[in-house]
Amino acid sequence: MPSPSDTDTGSRLAGGSPPTTAGAPARRAPRDDRRRRAAHWAVRSALPLTAILALATFLRFWQLTETGFNSDEAVYTGTAASLAGDPAMQAVFPVFRAHPVLFTGFLSLFLRGGTDDFTARAVAAAIGVVTVAVTYLLARRLYGRAAGLAAALLLAVMPYHVVVTRQVLLDGLMTLCATVALYCVVRYVQSGLDGLAWLLAAAGALGAATLSKETALVLVCGLYVFFVLCRSVRMRLRHALLATGVLALVVAAFPLAVSLAGHRTTGQNYLQWQLFRRANHSMGFYAATVPQAVGWVTLAAAVAGLVVLRRRNGWREGLLLCWIAAPVLFFTLWPVKGFPYLLAITPPLAVLAGRSLSALAELRPRPGRLRWGGKLRPRTLAAAGAVVVALAVAASLAVSSADRVTTAPNGRFLAGSGGLPGGREAGRWVREHVPSGAQLLAAGPSTANVLQFYGGKPVSALSVSVNRLHRNPSYTPVPNPDRALRDGEFQYLVWDSYTSHRAPFYGEKIRQLVEKYHGTAVYTSALKVPASSTDPTPTPVFVIYQVRVS
Protein backbone atom coordinates (compact mmCIF):
# COMPACT_ATOMS: atom_id res chain seq x y z
CA MET A 1 0.00 0.00 0.00
CA PRO A 2 1.25 3.44 -0.75
CA SER A 3 2.07 5.64 2.16
CA PRO A 4 0.30 8.99 2.70
CA SER A 5 3.30 10.79 1.43
CA ASP A 6 3.31 8.72 -1.73
CA THR A 7 -0.37 9.48 -2.23
CA ASP A 8 0.18 13.22 -1.78
CA THR A 9 3.06 13.13 -4.23
CA GLY A 10 1.04 11.26 -6.76
CA SER A 11 -1.83 13.72 -6.50
CA ARG A 12 0.47 16.64 -7.08
CA LEU A 13 2.14 14.98 -10.04
CA ALA A 14 -1.27 14.19 -11.54
CA GLY A 15 -2.25 17.83 -11.35
CA GLY A 16 -4.70 17.36 -8.51
CA SER A 17 -4.92 19.48 -5.37
CA PRO A 18 -3.16 18.20 -2.27
CA PRO A 19 -5.28 17.29 0.73
CA THR A 20 -6.19 20.31 2.88
CA THR A 21 -7.39 18.68 6.07
CA ALA A 22 -4.16 17.50 7.62
CA GLY A 23 -1.66 19.78 5.88
CA ALA A 24 -3.42 23.13 6.22
CA PRO A 25 -2.66 23.77 9.87
CA ALA A 26 1.00 22.91 9.34
CA ARG A 27 1.22 25.37 6.43
CA ARG A 28 -0.66 28.12 8.22
CA ALA A 29 1.56 27.91 11.28
CA PRO A 30 4.65 29.48 9.63
CA ARG A 31 2.48 32.34 8.36
CA ASP A 32 1.04 32.90 11.80
CA ASP A 33 4.53 32.82 13.28
CA ARG A 34 5.70 35.44 10.78
CA ARG A 35 2.76 37.67 11.60
CA ARG A 36 3.40 37.34 15.31
CA ARG A 37 7.09 38.12 14.82
CA ALA A 38 6.21 41.15 12.68
CA ALA A 39 3.79 42.43 15.31
CA HIS A 40 6.35 41.77 18.03
CA TRP A 41 8.99 43.73 16.11
CA ALA A 42 6.56 46.62 15.60
CA VAL A 43 5.89 46.84 19.31
CA ARG A 44 9.51 46.41 20.40
CA SER A 45 11.22 48.60 17.81
CA ALA A 46 8.99 50.51 15.39
CA LEU A 47 6.68 52.05 17.97
CA PRO A 48 9.48 53.27 20.30
CA LEU A 49 11.39 54.66 17.32
CA THR A 50 8.26 56.41 16.08
CA ALA A 51 7.76 57.97 19.50
CA ILE A 52 11.40 59.15 19.52
CA LEU A 53 11.07 60.69 16.07
CA ALA A 54 7.85 62.39 17.13
CA LEU A 55 9.67 63.87 20.13
CA ALA A 56 12.53 65.01 17.88
CA THR A 57 10.01 66.63 15.54
CA PHE A 58 8.25 68.44 18.36
CA LEU A 59 11.43 69.94 19.81
CA ARG A 60 12.60 71.12 16.39
CA PHE A 61 9.29 72.60 15.20
CA TRP A 62 8.02 74.04 18.48
CA GLN A 63 7.91 77.87 18.29
CA LEU A 64 10.03 77.61 15.17
CA THR A 65 9.49 81.19 13.99
CA GLU A 66 9.20 82.90 17.37
CA THR A 67 12.41 84.82 16.59
CA GLY A 68 13.59 86.05 13.20
CA PHE A 69 16.67 84.96 11.29
CA ASN A 70 20.22 85.59 12.38
CA SER A 71 22.89 86.68 9.91
CA ASP A 72 23.81 83.24 8.54
CA GLU A 73 20.17 82.23 8.22
CA ALA A 74 19.44 85.40 6.28
CA VAL A 75 22.37 84.76 3.94
CA TYR A 76 21.57 81.09 3.26
CA THR A 77 17.84 81.69 2.84
CA GLY A 78 18.52 84.72 0.64
CA THR A 79 20.93 82.67 -1.47
CA ALA A 80 18.36 79.87 -1.80
CA ALA A 81 15.74 82.43 -2.81
CA SER A 82 18.16 83.79 -5.43
CA LEU A 83 18.55 80.26 -6.82
CA ALA A 84 14.75 79.95 -6.82
CA GLY A 85 14.53 83.05 -9.03
CA ASP A 86 13.52 85.77 -6.55
CA PRO A 87 14.68 89.02 -8.24
CA ALA A 88 14.64 91.03 -5.00
CA MET A 89 17.00 88.56 -3.31
CA GLN A 90 19.23 88.23 -6.37
CA ALA A 91 20.06 91.93 -6.07
CA VAL A 92 21.27 91.49 -2.48
CA PHE A 93 22.44 87.88 -2.00
CA PRO A 94 24.68 86.41 -4.74
CA VAL A 95 24.49 82.67 -5.42
CA PHE A 96 28.21 81.98 -5.02
CA ARG A 97 29.57 83.02 -1.65
CA ALA A 98 31.91 81.40 0.85
CA HIS A 99 30.45 77.87 0.83
CA PRO A 100 29.21 75.22 -1.63
CA VAL A 101 25.57 75.38 -2.62
CA LEU A 102 24.17 71.89 -1.98
CA PHE A 103 22.08 72.97 0.99
CA THR A 104 20.95 76.25 -0.54
CA GLY A 105 20.16 74.47 -3.79
CA PHE A 106 18.08 71.89 -1.95
CA LEU A 107 16.34 74.62 0.04
CA SER A 108 15.56 76.58 -3.13
CA LEU A 109 13.26 73.74 -4.24
CA PHE A 110 10.92 74.67 -1.39
CA LEU A 111 11.06 78.44 -1.98
CA ARG A 112 9.67 78.51 -5.51
CA GLY A 113 6.39 79.90 -4.27
CA GLY A 114 7.95 82.61 -2.11
CA THR A 115 10.32 83.08 0.79
CA ASP A 116 9.20 82.79 4.39
CA ASP A 117 10.82 81.95 7.70
CA PHE A 118 8.82 78.83 8.47
CA THR A 119 9.45 77.02 5.19
CA ALA A 120 13.20 77.59 5.35
CA ARG A 121 13.51 76.52 8.97
CA ALA A 122 11.12 73.58 8.50
CA VAL A 123 13.45 72.13 5.84
CA ALA A 124 16.41 72.39 8.23
CA ALA A 125 14.40 70.90 11.10
CA ALA A 126 13.24 67.97 8.95
CA ILE A 127 16.87 67.25 8.08
CA GLY A 128 17.61 67.12 11.80
CA VAL A 129 14.82 64.58 12.38
CA VAL A 130 16.13 62.38 9.57
CA THR A 131 19.57 62.47 11.21
CA VAL A 132 18.02 61.04 14.38
CA ALA A 133 16.67 58.10 12.34
CA VAL A 134 20.05 57.49 10.68
CA THR A 135 21.73 57.58 14.10
CA TYR A 136 19.36 54.81 15.21
CA LEU A 137 20.42 52.69 12.23
CA LEU A 138 24.09 53.35 12.97
CA ALA A 139 23.89 52.43 16.67
CA ARG A 140 21.73 49.37 15.98
CA ARG A 141 24.23 48.14 13.42
CA LEU A 142 27.10 48.57 15.90
CA TYR A 143 25.57 47.58 19.25
CA GLY A 144 22.03 46.30 18.75
CA ARG A 145 18.45 47.52 18.89
CA ALA A 146 18.50 48.76 22.50
CA ALA A 147 21.60 50.88 21.87
CA GLY A 148 20.00 52.20 18.68
CA LEU A 149 16.90 53.39 20.51
CA ALA A 150 18.99 54.93 23.31
CA ALA A 151 21.26 56.77 20.85
CA ALA A 152 18.31 58.08 18.82
CA LEU A 153 16.59 59.25 21.99
CA LEU A 154 19.68 61.12 23.18
CA LEU A 155 20.19 62.85 19.84
CA ALA A 156 16.48 63.67 19.59
CA VAL A 157 16.62 65.75 22.78
CA MET A 158 20.28 66.86 22.76
CA PRO A 159 20.33 70.68 23.13
CA TYR A 160 23.24 71.13 20.73
CA HIS A 161 21.56 69.22 17.90
CA VAL A 162 18.11 70.65 18.63
CA VAL A 163 19.27 74.29 18.66
CA VAL A 164 21.41 74.07 15.51
CA THR A 165 18.92 72.09 13.40
CA ARG A 166 16.19 74.64 14.18
CA GLN A 167 18.20 77.15 12.15
CA VAL A 168 18.80 77.55 8.43
CA LEU A 169 22.45 76.51 8.62
CA LEU A 170 24.71 74.30 6.51
CA ASP A 171 25.77 72.13 9.44
CA GLY A 172 22.53 70.16 9.67
CA LEU A 173 22.71 68.70 6.16
CA MET A 174 26.46 68.23 6.49
CA THR A 175 25.92 66.20 9.67
CA LEU A 176 23.22 64.07 8.04
CA CYS A 177 25.44 63.22 5.06
CA ALA A 178 28.42 62.57 7.35
CA THR A 179 26.37 60.19 9.53
CA VAL A 180 25.24 58.29 6.43
CA ALA A 181 28.90 58.04 5.42
CA LEU A 182 29.82 56.69 8.85
CA TYR A 183 27.07 54.07 8.60
CA CYS A 184 28.39 52.98 5.19
CA VAL A 185 31.92 52.68 6.58
CA VAL A 186 30.59 50.42 9.36
CA ARG A 187 28.87 48.21 6.77
CA TYR A 188 32.10 48.07 4.79
CA VAL A 189 34.15 46.94 7.78
CA GLN A 190 31.51 44.43 8.86
CA SER A 191 31.49 42.93 5.38
CA GLY A 192 35.08 41.84 5.90
CA LEU A 193 36.30 44.60 3.58
CA ASP A 194 34.65 42.80 0.65
CA GLY A 195 31.71 45.22 0.35
CA LEU A 196 33.33 47.73 -1.97
CA ALA A 197 29.93 49.21 -2.78
CA TRP A 198 29.55 50.30 0.85
CA LEU A 199 32.93 52.08 0.79
CA LEU A 200 32.07 53.86 -2.45
CA ALA A 201 28.73 54.87 -0.96
CA ALA A 202 30.59 56.25 2.06
CA ALA A 203 32.84 58.27 -0.26
CA GLY A 204 29.81 59.64 -2.10
CA ALA A 205 28.11 60.58 1.17
CA LEU A 206 31.27 62.31 2.40
CA GLY A 207 31.38 64.17 -0.91
CA ALA A 208 27.80 65.31 -0.35
CA ALA A 209 28.74 66.41 3.18
CA THR A 210 31.60 68.44 1.70
CA LEU A 211 29.26 70.03 -0.83
CA SER A 212 27.07 70.99 2.12
CA LYS A 213 29.99 72.52 4.00
CA GLU A 214 33.59 72.18 2.91
CA THR A 215 34.89 71.57 6.44
CA ALA A 216 33.46 68.03 6.26
CA LEU A 217 36.73 67.06 4.56
CA VAL A 218 38.24 67.00 8.05
CA LEU A 219 36.32 63.76 8.65
CA VAL A 220 38.41 62.11 5.92
CA CYS A 221 41.43 62.63 8.19
CA GLY A 222 39.59 60.80 10.97
CA LEU A 223 38.93 57.85 8.67
CA TYR A 224 42.55 57.82 7.53
CA VAL A 225 43.78 57.67 11.14
CA PHE A 226 41.32 54.87 11.90
CA PHE A 227 42.41 52.64 9.02
CA VAL A 228 46.08 53.27 9.80
CA LEU A 229 45.88 52.60 13.54
CA CYS A 230 43.31 49.79 13.67
CA ARG A 231 45.23 46.53 13.32
CA SER A 232 42.14 44.39 12.86
CA VAL A 233 40.99 46.39 9.84
CA ARG A 234 43.12 46.75 6.75
CA MET A 235 41.76 48.46 3.66
CA ARG A 236 42.84 47.27 0.26
CA LEU A 237 44.82 49.80 -1.77
CA ARG A 238 42.49 49.42 -4.74
CA HIS A 239 39.50 50.17 -2.54
CA ALA A 240 41.18 53.27 -1.13
CA LEU A 241 42.01 54.60 -4.59
CA LEU A 242 38.51 54.00 -5.91
CA ALA A 243 36.90 55.65 -2.87
CA THR A 244 39.23 58.64 -3.18
CA GLY A 245 38.28 58.97 -6.82
CA VAL A 246 34.57 58.94 -6.02
CA LEU A 247 35.06 61.56 -3.29
CA ALA A 248 37.08 63.80 -5.59
CA LEU A 249 34.54 63.41 -8.40
CA VAL A 250 31.63 64.45 -6.16
CA VAL A 251 33.49 67.37 -4.58
CA ALA A 252 34.64 68.61 -8.00
CA ALA A 253 31.04 69.49 -8.82
CA PHE A 254 31.28 72.77 -6.89
CA PRO A 255 34.48 74.27 -8.37
CA LEU A 256 33.28 73.12 -11.79
CA ALA A 257 29.95 74.93 -11.31
CA VAL A 258 31.75 78.07 -10.12
CA SER A 259 34.05 77.97 -13.13
CA LEU A 260 31.25 77.39 -15.65
CA ALA A 261 29.28 80.26 -14.10
CA GLY A 262 32.21 82.59 -14.66
CA HIS A 263 32.93 83.12 -10.96
CA ARG A 264 36.36 81.52 -10.74
CA THR A 265 37.96 84.64 -9.24
CA THR A 266 35.10 84.88 -6.74
CA GLY A 267 35.85 81.38 -5.48
CA GLN A 268 39.55 82.22 -5.18
CA ASN A 269 38.77 85.39 -3.19
CA TYR A 270 36.57 83.48 -0.76
CA LEU A 271 39.24 80.80 -0.25
CA GLN A 272 41.82 83.48 0.41
CA TRP A 273 39.54 85.15 2.95
CA GLN A 274 38.79 81.85 4.73
CA LEU A 275 42.49 81.05 5.06
CA PHE A 276 43.50 84.45 6.43
CA ARG A 277 40.54 85.34 8.65
CA ARG A 278 41.33 86.70 12.08
CA ALA A 279 40.57 84.63 15.15
CA ASN A 280 37.13 85.35 16.58
CA HIS A 281 37.34 83.21 19.73
CA SER A 282 39.98 81.78 22.03
CA MET A 283 41.12 78.15 21.83
CA GLY A 284 38.98 77.30 24.83
CA PHE A 285 35.74 78.34 23.10
CA TYR A 286 34.48 74.82 22.41
CA ALA A 287 35.52 73.50 25.80
CA ALA A 288 33.38 76.20 27.38
CA THR A 289 30.30 75.93 25.13
CA VAL A 290 29.94 72.49 23.53
CA PRO A 291 29.95 70.19 26.62
CA GLN A 292 27.03 72.14 28.11
CA ALA A 293 25.17 72.02 24.81
CA VAL A 294 25.82 68.31 24.29
CA GLY A 295 24.98 67.60 27.91
CA TRP A 296 27.45 66.68 30.63
CA VAL A 297 25.42 63.57 31.32
CA THR A 298 25.83 62.48 27.68
CA LEU A 299 29.59 62.90 27.86
CA ALA A 300 29.70 61.08 31.20
CA ALA A 301 27.75 58.15 29.79
CA ALA A 302 29.99 57.91 26.73
CA VAL A 303 33.21 58.02 28.78
CA ALA A 304 31.86 55.61 31.39
CA GLY A 305 31.10 53.07 28.70
CA LEU A 306 34.60 53.33 27.26
CA VAL A 307 36.10 52.77 30.72
CA VAL A 308 33.79 50.18 32.23
CA LEU A 309 33.44 48.19 29.01
CA ARG A 310 37.09 48.58 28.03
CA ARG A 311 37.55 44.84 27.57
CA ARG A 312 35.00 44.99 24.78
CA ASN A 313 36.53 48.01 23.09
CA GLY A 314 37.60 47.34 19.53
CA TRP A 315 37.38 48.77 16.04
CA ARG A 316 33.88 50.12 16.63
CA GLU A 317 34.95 52.41 19.43
CA GLY A 318 38.13 53.32 17.54
CA LEU A 319 36.12 54.39 14.52
CA LEU A 320 33.74 56.55 16.56
CA LEU A 321 36.56 58.18 18.52
CA CYS A 322 38.55 58.99 15.38
CA TRP A 323 35.41 60.45 13.83
CA ILE A 324 34.97 62.67 16.90
CA ALA A 325 38.62 63.61 17.43
CA ALA A 326 39.32 64.92 13.91
CA PRO A 327 36.90 67.90 13.92
CA VAL A 328 37.48 68.61 17.63
CA LEU A 329 41.24 68.95 17.16
CA PHE A 330 40.95 70.83 13.87
CA PHE A 331 38.48 73.47 15.00
CA THR A 332 40.17 73.92 18.36
CA LEU A 333 43.39 74.84 16.55
CA TRP A 334 41.69 76.71 13.69
CA PRO A 335 41.48 80.43 14.53
CA VAL A 336 37.91 80.90 13.27
CA LYS A 337 35.31 79.18 15.44
CA GLY A 338 31.55 78.97 15.31
CA PHE A 339 29.06 77.44 17.69
CA PRO A 340 27.61 74.89 15.20
CA TYR A 341 30.95 73.77 13.71
CA LEU A 342 31.18 70.57 15.82
CA LEU A 343 27.66 69.33 15.10
CA ALA A 344 29.03 66.32 13.19
CA ILE A 345 30.33 64.79 16.43
CA THR A 346 26.87 64.59 18.02
CA PRO A 347 25.68 61.32 16.35
CA PRO A 348 28.79 59.29 17.32
CA LEU A 349 28.68 60.77 20.83
CA ALA A 350 25.04 59.71 21.11
CA VAL A 351 25.99 56.23 19.88
CA LEU A 352 28.71 55.85 22.52
CA ALA A 353 26.36 57.07 25.25
CA GLY A 354 23.59 54.79 23.93
CA ARG A 355 26.00 51.86 24.13
CA SER A 356 26.61 52.59 27.81
CA LEU A 357 22.92 52.93 28.65
CA SER A 358 21.98 49.74 26.82
CA ALA A 359 24.75 47.88 28.69
CA LEU A 360 22.89 48.57 31.95
CA ALA A 361 20.37 45.96 30.85
CA GLU A 362 23.10 43.32 31.22
CA LEU A 363 23.55 43.97 34.93
CA ARG A 364 22.34 41.18 37.21
CA PRO A 365 21.29 41.56 40.85
CA ARG A 366 22.72 39.17 43.39
CA PRO A 367 20.72 35.94 43.67
CA GLY A 368 18.10 35.97 46.41
CA ARG A 369 18.16 39.72 46.91
CA LEU A 370 15.42 40.85 44.52
CA ARG A 371 12.25 38.88 43.76
CA TRP A 372 9.21 39.67 41.70
CA GLY A 373 6.05 37.60 42.21
CA GLY A 374 8.06 35.04 44.15
CA LYS A 375 10.37 34.41 41.19
CA LEU A 376 13.72 35.96 40.50
CA ARG A 377 13.67 37.95 37.25
CA PRO A 378 17.08 39.60 36.93
CA ARG A 379 16.80 40.25 33.18
CA THR A 380 13.47 42.02 33.55
CA LEU A 381 14.70 44.12 36.44
CA ALA A 382 17.93 45.05 34.65
CA ALA A 383 16.09 45.99 31.47
CA ALA A 384 13.59 48.07 33.42
CA GLY A 385 16.40 49.83 35.26
CA ALA A 386 18.17 50.61 31.98
CA VAL A 387 14.97 52.09 30.54
CA VAL A 388 14.44 54.24 33.64
CA VAL A 389 18.00 55.57 33.52
CA ALA A 390 17.79 56.31 29.79
CA LEU A 391 14.51 58.15 30.22
CA ALA A 392 15.90 60.15 33.13
CA VAL A 393 18.94 61.18 31.08
CA ALA A 394 16.74 62.08 28.11
CA ALA A 395 14.38 64.07 30.34
CA SER A 396 17.26 66.20 31.65
CA LEU A 397 18.42 66.91 28.09
CA ALA A 398 14.88 67.67 26.92
CA VAL A 399 14.41 70.21 29.71
CA SER A 400 17.67 71.89 28.73
CA SER A 401 16.62 71.95 25.06
CA ALA A 402 13.23 73.46 25.89
CA ASP A 403 14.94 76.07 28.05
CA ARG A 404 17.28 77.07 25.22
CA VAL A 405 14.37 77.34 22.81
CA THR A 406 12.26 79.54 25.10
CA THR A 407 14.94 81.54 26.97
CA ALA A 408 14.19 85.26 26.98
CA PRO A 409 16.75 87.36 25.04
CA ASN A 410 19.24 89.38 27.03
CA GLY A 411 20.53 91.78 24.38
CA ARG A 412 23.60 89.63 23.67
CA PHE A 413 24.00 87.04 20.96
CA LEU A 414 26.23 84.04 20.18
CA ALA A 415 26.33 83.37 16.44
CA GLY A 416 24.74 80.05 15.55
CA SER A 417 22.90 79.67 18.86
CA GLY A 418 19.52 80.86 17.56
CA GLY A 419 17.68 83.66 15.84
CA LEU A 420 18.50 87.35 16.23
CA PRO A 421 15.85 88.94 18.50
CA GLY A 422 14.55 92.21 17.15
CA GLY A 423 16.17 91.90 13.73
CA ARG A 424 13.08 90.81 11.83
CA GLU A 425 11.03 93.65 13.29
CA ALA A 426 13.71 96.22 12.47
CA GLY A 427 14.03 94.89 8.92
CA ARG A 428 10.30 95.06 8.32
CA TRP A 429 10.28 98.67 9.53
CA VAL A 430 13.01 99.43 7.01
CA ARG A 431 10.95 97.85 4.23
CA GLU A 432 7.86 99.87 5.11
CA HIS A 433 9.32 103.26 6.07
CA VAL A 434 12.71 103.79 4.43
CA PRO A 435 12.21 105.34 0.98
CA SER A 436 13.47 103.62 -2.12
CA GLY A 437 17.03 104.58 -2.99
CA ALA A 438 18.02 105.37 0.60
CA GLN A 439 21.01 103.58 2.07
CA LEU A 440 21.80 102.52 5.62
CA LEU A 441 25.07 102.12 7.49
CA ALA A 442 25.15 99.54 10.29
CA ALA A 443 27.88 98.74 12.78
CA GLY A 444 28.54 95.20 11.57
CA PRO A 445 27.80 92.94 8.56
CA SER A 446 25.72 90.51 10.63
CA THR A 447 23.16 93.20 11.34
CA ALA A 448 23.40 94.40 7.74
CA ASN A 449 22.53 90.92 6.41
CA VAL A 450 19.40 90.64 8.55
CA LEU A 451 18.19 94.15 7.62
CA GLN A 452 18.83 93.50 3.93
CA PHE A 453 16.89 90.22 4.03
CA TYR A 454 13.83 91.60 5.77
CA GLY A 455 14.10 95.20 4.58
CA GLY A 456 15.04 94.78 0.93
CA LYS A 457 17.31 97.85 1.07
CA PRO A 458 21.12 97.95 0.70
CA VAL A 459 22.89 98.12 4.07
CA SER A 460 26.64 98.66 4.44
CA ALA A 461 28.71 97.81 7.50
CA LEU A 462 31.17 100.00 9.33
CA SER A 463 33.37 97.13 10.58
CA VAL A 464 34.17 95.66 7.14
CA SER A 465 37.94 95.78 6.73
CA VAL A 466 39.55 97.59 3.81
CA ASN A 467 42.15 94.79 3.74
CA ARG A 468 41.00 92.14 1.25
CA LEU A 469 42.61 89.38 3.31
CA HIS A 470 40.46 90.26 6.32
CA ARG A 471 37.03 90.76 4.80
CA ASN A 472 34.32 88.68 3.22
CA PRO A 473 34.39 89.41 -0.54
CA SER A 474 30.59 89.84 -0.45
CA TYR A 475 30.93 93.00 1.63
CA THR A 476 32.01 96.43 0.44
CA PRO A 477 34.07 98.44 2.94
CA VAL A 478 33.38 102.05 3.88
CA PRO A 479 36.90 103.52 4.08
CA ASN A 480 35.81 106.98 5.17
CA PRO A 481 32.37 106.99 6.83
CA ASP A 482 32.61 110.71 7.69
CA ARG A 483 33.06 111.71 4.08
CA ALA A 484 30.37 109.24 2.95
CA LEU A 485 27.89 110.86 5.33
CA ARG A 486 28.90 114.38 4.31
CA ASP A 487 28.44 113.44 0.65
CA GLY A 488 24.97 112.08 1.40
CA GLU A 489 25.71 108.44 0.57
CA PHE A 490 23.96 107.28 3.76
CA GLN A 491 20.74 108.64 5.16
CA TYR A 492 20.35 106.22 8.09
CA LEU A 493 22.64 104.85 10.79
CA VAL A 494 21.86 101.60 12.65
CA TRP A 495 23.07 100.84 16.18
CA ASP A 496 22.51 97.38 17.64
CA SER A 497 23.35 95.90 21.02
CA TYR A 498 24.74 92.64 19.59
CA THR A 499 27.53 94.28 17.59
CA SER A 500 28.17 96.75 20.41
CA HIS A 501 28.70 93.85 22.83
CA ARG A 502 30.94 91.90 20.46
CA ALA A 503 32.83 94.89 18.97
CA PRO A 504 32.41 97.90 21.31
CA PHE A 505 34.62 100.10 19.13
CA TYR A 506 32.18 100.05 16.20
CA GLY A 507 29.14 100.44 18.42
CA GLU A 508 30.70 103.56 19.91
CA LYS A 509 31.71 104.77 16.45
CA ILE A 510 28.06 104.62 15.31
CA ARG A 511 27.04 106.68 18.34
CA GLN A 512 29.72 109.27 17.55
CA LEU A 513 28.50 109.55 13.97
CA VAL A 514 24.91 109.90 15.18
CA GLU A 515 25.91 112.78 17.44
CA LYS A 516 28.12 114.43 14.84
CA TYR A 517 25.52 114.35 12.06
CA HIS A 518 22.50 115.20 14.17
CA GLY A 519 20.89 111.78 14.06
CA THR A 520 17.29 111.41 15.15
CA ALA A 521 16.01 108.07 16.40
CA VAL A 522 13.15 107.07 14.08
CA TYR A 523 12.85 103.44 15.18
CA THR A 524 13.72 101.55 18.37
CA SER A 525 13.34 97.82 18.87
CA ALA A 526 13.26 97.03 22.58
CA LEU A 527 13.12 93.64 24.28
CA LYS A 528 11.84 92.68 27.68
CA VAL A 529 15.02 91.55 29.35
CA PRO A 530 14.36 90.02 32.80
CA ALA A 531 16.66 91.98 35.09
CA SER A 532 14.91 90.26 37.98
CA SER A 533 12.00 87.91 38.41
CA THR A 534 9.62 90.83 39.08
CA ASP A 535 11.09 93.68 37.07
CA PRO A 536 11.54 92.98 33.36
CA THR A 537 13.37 95.96 31.89
CA PRO A 538 12.89 97.08 28.26
CA THR A 539 16.32 97.13 26.64
CA PRO A 540 16.91 98.62 23.16
CA VAL A 541 18.55 96.17 20.76
CA PHE A 542 18.08 98.05 17.47
CA VAL A 543 17.97 101.81 17.04
CA ILE A 544 17.72 103.35 13.57
CA TYR A 545 18.71 107.02 13.22
CA GLN A 546 17.99 109.37 10.37
CA VAL A 547 20.93 111.73 9.88
CA ARG A 548 21.07 115.25 8.51
CA VAL A 549 24.18 117.00 7.28
CA SER A 550 24.20 120.66 8.28
Image (cartoon, rainbow, N blue to C red):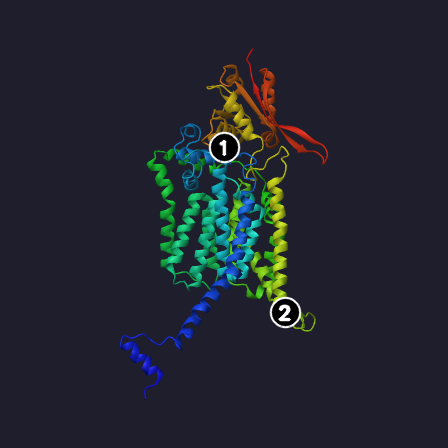
59 vs 3, nearest the viewer: 3
Q: Residue at x 34, y 85 (%)?
A: 3
Question: Disc 2 to disc 1, how far (Cα)?
Answer: 64 Å
- Residue furthest top as drawn: 550
Q: Which residue is mark 2?
A: 378
Residue 548 occupies quadrant = top right
Q: Which residue is mark 1?
A: 470
Relative to 351, residue 267 above or below = above
Dot 2 amino acid type: Pro
Dot 1 amino acid type: His
Relative to 366, residue 273 above or below = above
In the rendered structure, the answer to whether residue 404 lies left or right of residue 107 reads right
Q: Callout 1: 10 Å neighbours few (<14), some, many (20+)?
A: some
Q: Is residue 329 visible?
A: no
In the rendered structure, the answer to whether residue 6 lies left or right of residue 220 reads left
Quarter of the image where the C terminus is located: top right
Q: Is residue 54 visible?
A: yes
Give the percent coordinates (x, y) of residue 93: 44, 31
